[in-house]
Amino acid sequence: MGAANQLSFLPDDYLQCKAQRRSNIICAALAFIVIVTIGTAFTATEHLNHKADRDNALVQAQYADAARQIRQVQELQDKQRRMARQAELAESLLEKVPRSYLLAEITNALPEGVSLLDFVLDAKRHTSASASAPMTAYDRHKAAIDTTKGPPPAPLPEPVVYDVTMKLTGVADTDVQVSNFIGKLSRSPLLRDVNLVISDEYTMADQKLRRFQLEMTLDPNAEIKPGETLRHDAPPDRHAPSSREEVP
């Protein structure tokens, strides 16, 4: 019986071929799965790359638009600075304090018994100390870097500033009157650095008087706007020249 059960009518290589076919099917299925997985991963990667490219292009466009706006703002600010500098330059060419106002300010400060003999006004262009200062190592390094970026913009003209000095000579009955005169001038919003240079005895028409000489400067921040009038501590003195009544 055992020998009869071991009998087989199948070809000898049938089982081997069947196992081979099964292995081929399994390998093909696995290969298909791998190919599908790789294709899916490749497609997903390409989709992510395209999305990243679109996002990058959008960000670059936003950066370019922001840079354009910043450049426009900088150009506008530069234009505003140039216009402001030109306005300052035009304003510097005009007298901030007309000389008639200065004369009125001085004559209205004259106490009783004080008269003026001479008045000299001198204006010299102010020279800035920073213009002649030597360049530091940092300034030289920055200038060398700026030259590599192209020609620098044309420098803006500097406003013209004048140092106005005044010297006056007068006579008074006493030194007390001279002191009062100096005190009134020192309190003036237009003047500063009022100094007594000379004070000596002076004889005029057989009368002994005190001759004095004062030096002062115009406050560089002083300005008389159109329609503005000066305020004085005391009414005009009768010894003041009549020109003070013509001051607007």
Image (cartoon, rainbow, N blue to C red):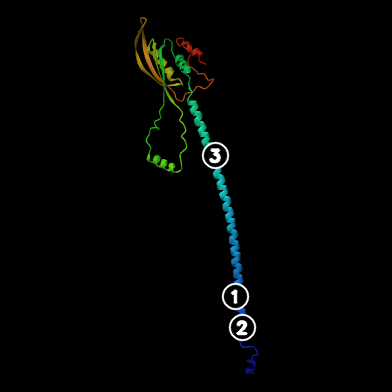
Between disc 1 and disc 2, whose residue precedes? 2
Between disc 3 and disc 1, whose residue precedes? 1
Q: Residue shown at 57%/50% (left/top)?
A: 59
The reply to whether the C-beta atoms of the residues labelled 3 and 1 are less than 8 Å apart is no
Q: Is residue 46 visible?
A: yes
Task: Find residue 203 and report its horizontal and vertical position in percent.
Answer: 35, 7
Label 2 SS? helix
What is the tally of numbered marks visible in this picture? Answer: 3
Task: Find residue 90 and report its horizontal and vertical position in percent.
Answer: 50, 27
Label 3 SS? helix
Identified by mark 2, the residue type is Cys
User: Which residue position holds label 3?
Assistant: 73
User: Which residue position holds label 2?
Assistant: 17
Q: In front: 110, or 221?
A: 221
User: Which residue position holds label 1?
Assistant: 27
Q: Residue shown at 36%/12% (left/top)?
A: 211
Task: Find residue 138 and report its horizontal and vertical position in percent.
Answer: 39, 41
Q: Looking at the rendering, in which quadrant would you find the N terminus?
A: bottom right
Q: Is residue 235 visible?
A: no
